[in-house]
């Protein structure tokens, strides 16, 4: 239980908001959950009861604590019920002007000390904060889906955010037993930026005709130890969500070629082949259709794995070089946010910085595309014979 006593307000009772409310109430806060849509609130209320009942059944929660959590959670249809909050977390539709409107309205309700956080995945915290009279109390607190189960939370100060606010946000989320990492307010923050090549390079390998989806998935699992292959994972996340994140990161990074989305995924998105939830994506999930078998060629599998891994390491190195986050936080984010078998920078040390850099340089020279440009940090480290960890 947290020893922080203030009330927590959550705006938006959809997938993320309802999970965040559950975490806060479980940690001991009084929680108010607000949504403009009555049926979304009803759904969240029913879902919380079902989740808690399941936890009791599995003996992960006592009936008394479940009762307390239910009593501590209030479902409200007006922001005026947020006046006693010490922290609010917004998890509404991913639209800048709608979020800005909610933040400026919130400011008229809450006390001067209240922290206003957004769970946005892709919008600039600084842009959201610009709608406020006190942008210094606005911060990003980015949970992963499903919020109660995923340990990682990215804490993202905007350019105006007060250091005390960052400290307090970290303190409260740590007290909810989450793993926090600090990220600069840049597109995709840590995880959604550094993970892009896992999807993008896998699709590129497929588009070039080197291997099919099943073989690429097999290669990453077999040789990399990833729990899921990129195509399985995109189908699970949803190709609508995954494509949109890719496109957003690409456009917000001023169309840097390294993040360019693929037509393969765009077509799936257009065809509403979102993946598991729609019955078809890269794979067909309708009953009776069996999954295709990979071509288990060791040399091919190793090559595929190494090409994707090298691109991921290059991205992680660049994120470090550009101050997106610290070495430790980049490695922690990828192991706790997307379950990578180990941190990418640690992995780079294991392979050898020289070998990593040679491989990315080889791709750069072969293709002549900016997409494969080696991070300056890697080149610098080779010259100085350095490792990420000493
Ligand atoms: N779903 C994910 O995987 C995920 C992960 C991390 C962060 N996020 C971010 O979390 C936020 C919410 O995502 P979600 O998946 O929970 O969405 P969702 O569609 O499941 O829920 C959004 C809820 O917000 C409500 N809403 C919309 N406008 C509102 C307003 N003006 N005031 C109050 N309520 C309003 C909707 O009625 C809906 O219930 C987004 O910013 C998204 O980028 C999503």
Image (cartoon, rainbow, N blue to C red):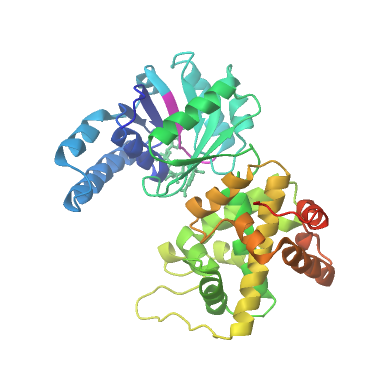
Nearest the camera: 124 or 41? 124
Number of callouts in the render?
0
Q: Residue 249, percent across and down?
A: 65, 49
Above or below residue 15? Residue 28 is above
Please say whether residue 92 is one of the residues in the magenta stretch: yes
Above or below residue 82? Residue 180 is below
Q: Residue 299, percent across and down?
A: 63, 83
Name the residue rendered at 57%, 62% in the picture. 270
User: Ligand 1 falls in which quarter?
Assistant: top left
Above or below residue 278? Residue 303 is below
Q: Which residues are magenta?
A: 87-94
Q: Is 9 left, or right, of 318 in this rendering?
A: left
Residue found at the very far front of the displayed protein = 390
The N terminus, quarter of image: top left
Residue found at the very far left of the displayed protein = 63
Above or below residue 350? Residue 172 is above
Q: Is 25 left, or right, of 63 in this rendering?
A: right
Residue 20 in view (yes/no): yes
Name the residue rendered at 58%, 53% in the picture. 244
Please say whether residue 57 is one of the residues in the magenta stretch: no
Q: Residue 358, percent across and down?
A: 78, 67
Q: Residue 82, percent across and down?
A: 38, 21
Name the residue rendered at 20%, 36% in the picture. 65
Residue 203 in view (yes/no): no
């Amino acid at each position: 239980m947290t020893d922080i006593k203030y009330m927590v307000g959550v705006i938006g009772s959809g997938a993320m908001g309802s999970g965040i409310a559950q975490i806060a109430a479980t940690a001991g806060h009084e929680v108010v959950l607000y949504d403009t849509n009555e049926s979304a609130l009803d759904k969240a209320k029913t879902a919380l009861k079902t989740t808690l009942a399941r936890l009791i059944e599995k003996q992960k929660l006592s009936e008394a604590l479940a009762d307390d959590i239910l009593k501590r959670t209030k479902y409200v249809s007006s922001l005026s019920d947020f006046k006693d909050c010490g922290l609010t977390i917004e998890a509404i539709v991913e639209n800048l002007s709608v979020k800005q409107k909610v933040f400026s309205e919130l400011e008229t309700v809450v006390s001067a000390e209240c922290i206003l956080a957004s769970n946005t995945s892709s919008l600039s915290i600084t842009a959201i904060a610009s709608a406020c009279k006190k942008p210094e109390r606005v911060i990003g607190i980015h949970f992963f889906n499903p919020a109660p189960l995923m340990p990682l939370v990215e804490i993202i100060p905007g350019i105006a955010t007060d250091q005390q606010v960052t400290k307090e946000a970290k303190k409260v989320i740590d007290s909810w037993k989450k793993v926090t990492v600090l990220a600069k307010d840049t597109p995709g923050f840590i995880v959604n930026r550094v993970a892009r090549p896992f999807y993008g390079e896998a699709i590129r390998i497929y588009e070039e005709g080197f291997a099919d989806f099943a073989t690429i998935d097999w290669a990453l699992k077999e040789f990399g130890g990833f729990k899921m292959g990129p195509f399985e994972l995109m189908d699970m996340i949803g190709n609508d969500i995954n494509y949109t994140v890719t496109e957003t990161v690409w456009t917000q990074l001023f169309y840097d070629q390294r993040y360019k989305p693929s037509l393969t995924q765009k077509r799936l998105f257009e065809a509403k082949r979102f993946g598991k939830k729609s019955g078809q994506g890269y794979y067909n999930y309708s009953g009776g259709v069996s999954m295709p078998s990979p071509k288990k060629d060791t040399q091919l599998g190793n090559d595929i794995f190494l090409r994707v891994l090298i691109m991921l390491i290059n991205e992680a190195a660049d994120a470090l070089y550009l101050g997106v986050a610290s070495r430790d936080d980049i490695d922690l984010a990828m192991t706790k946010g997307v379950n990578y078998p180990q941190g990418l920078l640690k992995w780079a040390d294991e392979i050898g910085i020289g070998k990593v850099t040679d491989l990315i340089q080889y791709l750069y020279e072969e293709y002549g595309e900016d997409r494969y440009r080696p991070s300056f940090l890697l080149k610098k480290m080779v010259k100085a014979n350095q490792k990420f960890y000493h």
